[in-house]
């Protein structure tokens, strides 16, 4: 995409090209080194998660775990009922958040893209500004309001809280996708007997699949890693997501760092995996848009 | 899909053969059914709680009032009380220090990364994606990893410092006020710098190449090119990025809460942590509301100032 460099006619003399290649190679090497340094925390998390309880406290520390062990994963992740319950709760909350967000944001983004609405600017501004609101500013009043509604310590309460910030974000991301759906396609669908709803569901949605997947993944990951709402609205152990369980874990005396890092790695895994997929979709969406216009 | 509400668009009974008024009503009905559920939801879950919280700051709200209701009107008492406390102003000050430090470090690191990965080379996008991992990592994960890296006895950082002879024995970074703030700033910047990198990379892409070519023909050095082309051209994007980073760091709660819980001795108790403690440690939801209201006002004031300078510059 950005490979458009000096056009052939304006090619600099041969020496310049050679020098350019050299600087480029050095830039690539510097880029790799800096990235490696930047990811040391991630590396250290994985290394620690593969160590035994004794070797974690070796001074100086082993930079590679020799021999590596999966014992922390077996022990802390799959052998610990609290962790397992936390992971389950997180999955329930994240899936619920994803579905509710899609249910609300998909039609809204479509409506904001395709209908001429009075107050469009106000709604778009609202969706944008709302994303800047600190979670703690919502978590505290929500605790008070939810207390009187019986929503504290419930999946529903946590899902609603997560959606409060996920829906505006989703609408903001999705609207541009629906804007690129040509009006003629929608018109053609209506000529063929579709109404507003079916032309949205059968025509606009399939065309916008990359956007839908992107938003689904972002909503899921947001809820999966969410901490503030969970801390304020889930005081009962039965409902607490993994983020809270993990935080409690560290408050115990004598932290078992290898176990902690193993659980952290498991929490990070879906995020990193989904991120790899998400990248592909973003790239696909961009190239599709570029080739089809 | 589970979108239940818009189903009603399918020929409402009274409008089966719409007259002029009926058609008009239908034309307004469809958009409303698409958009309204989300708008109402955001209104109910964001706007209403925010207003409710501001209202609470004018009432006397403890745990009993939360459970039973019947809070007493307190006027400005909560504000007078909080603005008269040094603890409040201390945490306001800590908030500013933390946000300022995080903004500077995040921006510098993000700009460095953006410049480093500006020129296309094979694998550049992979490197960008790898760096972005730091941004998408759940805060619980990154905060815990930082705690472990900074551990006084067994942490990797201290091991490295000992190896090069800069440190003997232990140093508990999170146990002393100044190093604790520095530590949370570094951890915050580590998470946010990739985000800044993306914003600034987009800004750099937007600078016309012909500017650099012209400068090179005139014999400008790389530094001169940066000083006289990149810097002024990037300014609008850089300002927007700075504002965004400030908004995001000023409200940060989880990183600090998880790394230091506001300690040692309140040295990293920023306003969000302060508000949380007021509410859940001391069951004072009214003074917590004062803190969160102030937490909202600062970014709003800054944003207004930002848009005013924008307008003035464009005029």
Image: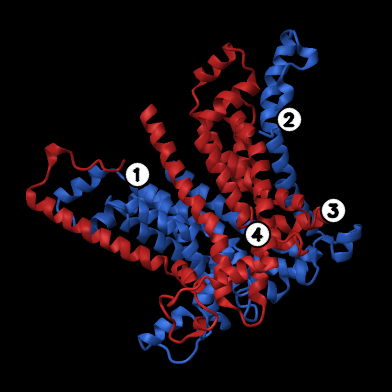
Kindly indicate whether the residues beneath marks 3 and 4 are on one polypeptide chain. yes
Q: Which residue is mark 4?
A: A87
Q: Residues within 10 Å of mark 1 (few under 14, many from 20)?
A: few
Q: Which residue is mark 2?
A: B5
Q: Which residue is mark 1?
A: B206
Q: Mark 4 or 2, which is nearer the eye?
A: 4
Mark 1 or mark 2, earlier in chain: 2
Q: Is residue B32 left or right of residue B230?
A: right
Q: Quadrant of the C terminus of chain B?
A: top left
Kindly indicate whether the residues beneath marks 1 and 2 are on one polypeptide chain. yes
The residues bearing labels 3 and 1 have C-alpha atoms spaced at a distance of: 51 Å
- Residue B259, image quadrant: bottom right
Q: Nearer the viewer, residue B151 or A65?
A: A65
Residue A26 higher or lower than B153, as above or below:
above
Q: Residue at x 73, y 38 (%)?
A: B40
Residue A224 pos. (x, y %): 62, 55
Residue A101 pos. (x, y %): 65, 42
- Residue B79, image quadrant: bottom right
Query: Tag 1, which chain?
Result: B
| Residue contact at pointers 4 and 2, CB within 8 angstroms | no
SS for tag 3? loop
Colour representing chain A:
red
Any mark on residue A150, and which? 3
SS for tag 1? loop
The residues bearing labels 3 and 4 have C-alpha atoms spaced at a distance of: 24 Å
| Residue contact at pointers 2 and 3, CB within 8 angstroms | no
Q: Is residue B135 left or right of residue B229?
A: right
Colour representing chain B:
blue
Q: Residues within 10 Å of mark 4 (few under 14, many from 20)?
A: many
Q: Residue at x 36, y 56 (%)?
A: B127
The residues bearing labels 1 and 2 have C-alpha atoms spaced at a distance of: 42 Å
Q: Residue at x 59, y 44 (%)?
A: A169
């Amino acid at each position: 995409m950005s490979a458009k460099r000096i056009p052939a006619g304006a090619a600099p003399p041969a020496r310049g090209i050679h020098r350019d290649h050299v600087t480029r190679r050095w830039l690539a090497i510097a880029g790799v080194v800096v990235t490696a340094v930047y990811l040391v925390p991630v590396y250290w998390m994985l290394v620690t998660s593969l160590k035994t309880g004794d070797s974690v406290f070796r001074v100086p520390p082993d930079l590679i775990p020799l021999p590596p062990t999966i014992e922390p994963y077996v022990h802390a992740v799959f052998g610990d009922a609290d962790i397992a319950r936390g992971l389950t709760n997180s999955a329930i909350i994240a899936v619920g958040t994803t579905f509710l967000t899609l249910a609300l944001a998909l039609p809204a983004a479509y409506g904001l893209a395709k209908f001429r609405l009075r107050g469009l600017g106000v709604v778009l501004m609202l969706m944008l500004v709302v994303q800047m609101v600190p979670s703690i500013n919502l978590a505290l009043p929500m605790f008070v309001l939810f207390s009187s509604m019986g929503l504290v310590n419930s999946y529903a309460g946590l899902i609603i809280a997560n959606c409060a910030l996920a829906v505006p974000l989703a609408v903001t991301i999705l609207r541009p996708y629906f804007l690129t759906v040509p009006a003629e396609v929608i018109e053609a669908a209506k000529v063929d007997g579709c109404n507003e709803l079916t032309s949205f569901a059968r025509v606009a949605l399939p065309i916008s699949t990359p956007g839908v997947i992107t938003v689904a993944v972002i909503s899921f990951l947001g809820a999966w890693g969410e901490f503030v709402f969970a801390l304020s609205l889930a005081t009962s152990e039965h409902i607490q997501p993994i983020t809270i369980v993990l935080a409690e874990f560290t408050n115990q005396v004598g932290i078992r760092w290898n176990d902690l890092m193993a659980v952290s790695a498991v929490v990070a895994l879906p995020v990193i995996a989904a991120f790899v997929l998400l990248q592909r979709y973003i790239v696909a969406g961009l190239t599709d848009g570029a080739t089809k216009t | 899909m589970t979108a239940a509400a818009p189903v009603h668009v399918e020929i409402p009974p009274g409008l089966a053969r719409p007259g002029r008024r009926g058609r008009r009503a239908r034309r307004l009905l469809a958009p409303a059914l698409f958009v309204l559920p989300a708008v109402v939801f955001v209104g109910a879950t964001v706007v209403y709680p925010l207003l409710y919280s501001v209202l609470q700051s004018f009432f006397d709200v403890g745990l009993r009032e939360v459970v039973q209701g019947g809070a007493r009107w307190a006027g400005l008492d909560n504000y007078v009380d909080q603005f008269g406390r040094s603890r409040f102003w201390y945490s306001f000050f800590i908030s500013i220090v933390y946000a300022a430090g995080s903004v500077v470090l995040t921006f510098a690191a993000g700009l460095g990364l953006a410049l480093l990965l500006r020129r296309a080379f094979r694998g550049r996008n992979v490197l960008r994606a790898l760096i972005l991992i730091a941004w998408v990592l759940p805060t619980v994960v990154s905060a815990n990893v930082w705690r472990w890296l900074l551990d006084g006895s067994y942490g990797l950082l201290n091991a490295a410092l000992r190896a090069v002879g800069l440190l003997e024995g232990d140093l508990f970074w999170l146990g002393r006020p100044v190093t604790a703030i520095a530590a949370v700033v570094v951890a915050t910047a580590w998470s946010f710098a990739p985000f800044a990198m993306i914003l600034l990379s987009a800004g750099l892409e937007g600078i016309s190449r012909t500017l650099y070519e012209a400068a090179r023909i005139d014999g400008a050095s790389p530094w001169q090119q940066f000083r006289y082309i990149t810097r002024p051209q990037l300014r609008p994007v850089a300002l927007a990025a700075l504002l965004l980073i400030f908004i995001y760091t000023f409200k940060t709660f989880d990183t600090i809460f998880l790394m230091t819980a506001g300690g040692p001795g309140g040295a990293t108790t920023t306003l969000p942590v302060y508000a949380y403690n007021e509410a859940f440690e001391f069951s004072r939801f009214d003074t917590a509301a004062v803190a969160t209201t102030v937490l909202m006002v600062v970014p709003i004031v800054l944003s207004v100032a930002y848009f005013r300078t924008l307008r003035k510059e464009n005029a």
